[in-house]
Amino acid sequence: MPPPPPENSVFINCPFDREYEPLLRVLLFCVIRCGLHPRIARERLDSSEPRIAKLVDLIRETRWGIHDLSRIQAKQKDEFYRMNMPFELGLDLGAKTFSETYRDKKVLIIAESPFSHQVGLSDLSNSDIRFHKADAESLALEVRNWFRESGIKTVPPGSIIWTDFNAFMNDFQIKRDLEGYKDADIRNMPVPEYLDFIHRWIAHHDSQNLP
Amino acid sequence: MISKTAPNSKLHVISRAGQWAITRQGASRVSKIVPTCEAAVKEARRIASGRAEIIVHRRDGTVAERIANGIATTH
């Protein structure tokens, strides 16, 4: 299946760990509820494909980029800074800066809190960065507002997206239980499978709300 | 995909801008906003009067508890 058109596609650059999962769930839902397609490194697994090639494809095939720089800081002694997210942000900004083809890219940089990222990434100190405070509702609102400020007039109000996400989570859990999913299945659920749940829920939701 | 219960027979207790809201599924407006989750559940029980299912969500949107016929099931 061909990828969705770049003008409707959003490159998601974020941490992939258990602590971030609640935020990733709402982030993916919010993007789809706003009528766009999230593109994320975990959307496909091909062990023969170098990771950098996959990232370049994602950047090439998207006109929107959301870069969450929360959790880049080492939390424990002897733990390293996590540099994948800043690296991928750099690739995306590089494409926008140095290529006429990608000049119209829209980029949202978001972090957990002010200053949390600035010690390790002071080059961004004068950039307009949004903050979600590790709160799912705040993340959904910030992302939704960015889409609206960037010219998408059809995005639903933030309160509707948040209410819908909660209703979706309820139906998602019921559906998973009915289909025999266990907690371990959920934790290890591939991103495309979760995205499929969201698409089906929103299609059903939209069909019930036709005028 | 959606559970068999009629949409308007579900009340959701969800976090909303630092407070807690009671929303009826399918309705565009919030029924009520209160300061705490406990107060929201109490108010939802009053609105439901045993006839609607109440779904209590955590701050991340996941389901913490379902209350049907006055009986709570924790998740």
Image (cartoon, coloured by chain):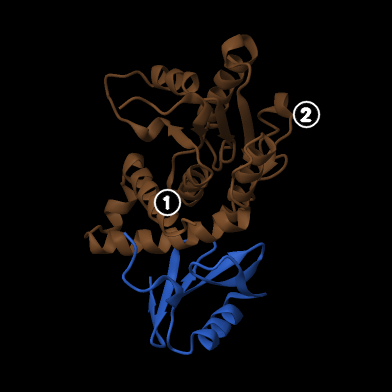
Chain colours: A brown, B blue
Q: Residue at x 66, y 41 (%)?
A: A148
Disc 1 marks a residue whose amino acid type is Ile
Residue A99 visible here: no
- Mark 1: secondary structure: helix
- Around disc 1, counting alpha carbons within 10 Å, would you say few (fewer than 14), some (14 to 19), or many (20 or more)? some
- Mark 2: secondary structure: loop
For the N terminus of chain A, the quadrant is top left
* Disc 1: host chain: A
Q: Which residue is mark 1?
A: A202
Q: Nearer the viewer, mark 1 or mark 2?
A: 1
Rendered position, A66 above or below A210:
above
- Around disc 2, counting alpha carbons within 10 Å, would you say few (fewer than 14), some (14 to 19), or many (20 or more)? few
Where's residue A189, x and y in %?
31, 46
Q: Nearer the viewer, residue B49 or A131?
A: B49
Q: Which mark is residue A118?
A: none
Q: Residue at x 59, y 45 (%)?
A: A155
Q: Nearer the viewer, residue A51 or A194?
A: A194
Judged left or right of residue A47, residue A168 is: right
Disc 2 marks a residue whose amino acid type is Asn
Cα–Cα gap, marks 1 and 2: 38 Å
Q: Which mark is residue A126?
A: 2
Rendered position, B38 above or below A98:
below
Q: Which quadrant of the view contains residue A106? A: top right
Residue A143 visible here: yes
Where's residue A177, x and y in %?
27, 63
Where's residue A190, x and y in %?
32, 42
